[in-house]
Amino acid sequence: MSGNFLDKAKNSSSLISEQRIIEYLSKLDKAVIISLDNLEFFSNHLVDIKIKIERVARSDIHHLKIDNNGIKLHETIGKSSINEAQLHNLVDGMFKDYSGYCFIVNAGISYVMFNGVVDDKINASFMKRKTMQLLLGTKKNVCDLEEVFENFFSACKYHKEYKEYCFSSNGMIKAEIKEQQLRNLLMKYLDHNVKGEVQPEFCTDYYNDEESVDIYLNDGTHRAIIEVKFAFKESYYSGNTYYSFSTRIGDGMKQLDKYALHLADGRRQVDYGYVYMFYCNDMTADTIRNKVNAKYKELEKVLSAEFFSIYKCTLANDLSCWCH
Amino acid sequence: MEKMRYMLSLFIFALKEEIKIPVNTLFRYVYIYSVSIDYLQDLSNSKEEVIIDKNIGIGDYSILHEALQSLNETRMINMIDAVNIESTESLQDYIQGLLSTERVKHDLNNITYFVGIVSNYSEDVILSIFYNEPNVLYATNRNENVIKLTNNKLYDLLKKFEIIANNECGKDLDRYDVFTTWIDFVFEEYLQGKGIE
């Protein structure tokens, strides 16, 4: 990774940090033009500049001139209600012959000028980064996982690559499809659709490497763990591991219980816990729901408080619905 | 703990425009700041050690948590919910009162500049920055949770980049430009991992 980073050196831009700072100052929702001969003046006096901007009138455009000692000049140069073109003309008129740096901040506009010229490269990279951050905003948070699970089920139903991955041409589930393959399928979808880190085999116990939950998600604010299970009826599966649906649901809940206890022991923060079941049998959706509820009721007395503190639900994904 | 309380209060002051401040993101800011300030301020031979919890992406959790509790008890912050806080007027008055001290102003200036850069990225990106910080990567690979800043790998990486960019490629980057370029690099790698190109 560090090698790739060093490769960026030839395309790097100066003023990139200042661009970020004016974006930060734009959150103050004031119209300001900051001029300075030396960039160090900006970093050395940022607190004074910020406090000054906080205290100027929102209705005007303010010009702050910064020198070695801080804010040398503060003048009002127009009304902040002017449109974008008028602002550019105002800045051009005042600073096109100025030898130094100008940072312009007003109502969603922020850009950098050096020696009277707008730095296109730095402004283009700023716009690109902003767009990317907006795109990232379309990914879901961990607290919205249930919506993502629904979307995943829709993707399984309507996108043929999921079926091709799991089914042979004779309509049977391939022998090589086991828990790990199904976990990877779900994990890849989550990684592309949920913010933050999505990790396989997250170790829940500091002292025992074997105690790993299938999927761990952390979006920076909330964390979730998912235990993946599968149960396929013999007539639909070319493999030779046949589990009872109810038994596997119970196994998933008990494993989640164990992980919840380990995590609590280690004072580790997890907010949500799920059991995710891939299945293929002849049972109706209602029967499946009843079986999940019955297993939950059966285990209710043996599951720990730590389990109930994180457990959200058990989800069941019926492979017989996939793209048939 | 007093040092951490002081540092946290400066961070929260620099973030006071935010409606809510996610606690873990705040803690990650403090970690990233701790490992990058040597480079940003061109300090060398830092004697500090940072303990990380690589599983939740946080440095010095217990000290940070204790410092945050102390700010809460003295009404410098409000806990909005289990994961978010907001600053109070008490904290703002307290910091404003300290600003006549050169040292405080210098520290706040550094932290404000740092916050000005990193607060442009969402919480998940900040988490990714933590996990991709060279000292964390090194500790994770060796299954360690103590980072000795006498051997600061982020410092070395940024310094190396600075030399290549400025001496070999004729750029004119200051230290904050180098730092921002690194953050952007991690951001781009994260986007690629999320299928956004």
Image (cartoon, rainbow, N blue to C red):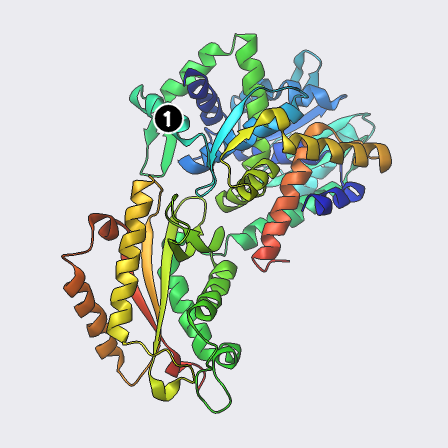
Q: Is residue B184 above or below residue A191?
A: above
**Quarter the C terminus of chain B occupies:** bottom right
Q: Residue furthest top?
A: B101
Q: Report whether A270 appears left or right of A62.
A: left
SS at badge 1 = helix
Q: Which x, y percent locates residue B189?
A: 63, 51
Q: Which x, y percent locates residue B115?
A: 55, 30
Q: Please, what is the three-letter code of the amino acid marked with disc 1?
A: Leu
Q: Report whether A259 appears left or right of A76.
A: left
Picture quadrant of residue B45: top right
Q: Is residue A146 above or below residue A32?
A: below
Q: Residues within 10 Å of mark 1 (few under 14, many from 20)?
A: many
- State the residue position of label 1: B68
Residue B132 in sight here: yes
Residue found at x 59% / y 35%: B135
Q: Which x, y percent locates residue B34?
A: 55, 27
Q: Is residue A170 above or below residue B190?
A: below
Residue found at x 49% / y 76%: A162
